[in-house]
Image (cartoon, rainbow, N blue to C red):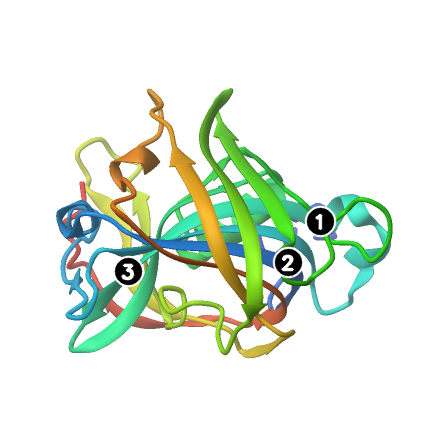
Amino acid sequence: MPTVRGYFHPKTATGASSLIPSPPWYYSGDLLTVEYRTDPARVRELLPEPLELADEDPGAVALIWADWQSCGASGEELLDPVRAQYKEAFAVVRCQYKGRTYTRCVYIWVDKDFALARGLHQGYPKKLGSIHQTRPHPYGPAPRIEAGARFGATLAAADRRIAQAVVTLREPSQSNGFVNAHPMAHHRWLPSIEKGGGLALDELVESGAASFEGGQPWVGDAELELFESPTEELARLEVREPIAAYYRQVGVVWDGGRLLESGTSGAE
């Protein structure tokens, strides 16, 4: 019998067509983070069982833009940039599971298929979108990483702009914010192929960086706008109170997660 290979679809005789390689996965990126507070009830409605609101600052949200280069263990994608470079924007909140605080990504958009496939494997609710952010550069008109530098960021999905921000840096910071500073608690869901069969896959998983390095974070202020869309619900996490904005360059390695429990989410 023939053997088909590949970490992800499509599986073939050689495995060369697989959309993503096996972990570990390596990332280098520029992050723009905007933190604010919304109605905690709007966060709660996005937390399926057994997750609960965080005890402290339950309405805190971070909307993050990221300009990434990524690769598998061989690093070969970096020399074929169409396979390495992508952009994403995602909204994260904090939650609790068995008394421990986690971060959870509730919305996320990317602009490449391989990034979407990786995210679905990890439990991120990824969709395709159009994401752009100002890139820093030491020459010409682009902003330097310094006090007063201004960065724009936009997010669109299904041909409609759903978020935009302008971040102005103020000073170096001790952190890159607090909302996205915990391990991730995500669900991996897959409906049964049989009608009425419920979920064939229903897992609550924990994951995070196997290793991390980062440059000097900068803190500043942001002007953030969210827009209604017939196909997106990001605007339900309305901005009630700004917290802060951040810029940081990071390097991350992801190499798997941990099953917390299965078959208990009650998702439909």
From the image, state whether disc 2 or disc 3 is nearer to you: 2
Query: Is residue 63 toward the left or the right of residue 85 in the image?
Result: left
Which residue is at the front of the view, 130 or 73?
130
Per the rendering, the mark at residue 203 is: 3
Q: How many marks?
A: 3
Q: Is residue 18 left or right of residue 153?
A: right
Tell me the SS state at disc 2. strand
**Which badge, 1 or 2, comes first in the chain's sequence?**
2
Quarter of the rendering containing residue 105: bottom left
Residue 239 on image: x %, y %:
29, 43
User: Which residue is disc 1 drawn over?
Assistant: 135
Q: Earlier in the sequence, mark 2 or mark 3?
A: 2
The amino acid at mark 2 is Asp
Give the CA distance from mark 1 to mark 2. Answer: 8 Å
**For mark 2, does the 10 Å Cα neighbourhood hold few (<14), some (14 to 19), or many (20 or more) residues?**
many
Q: Quadrant of residue 133?
A: top right
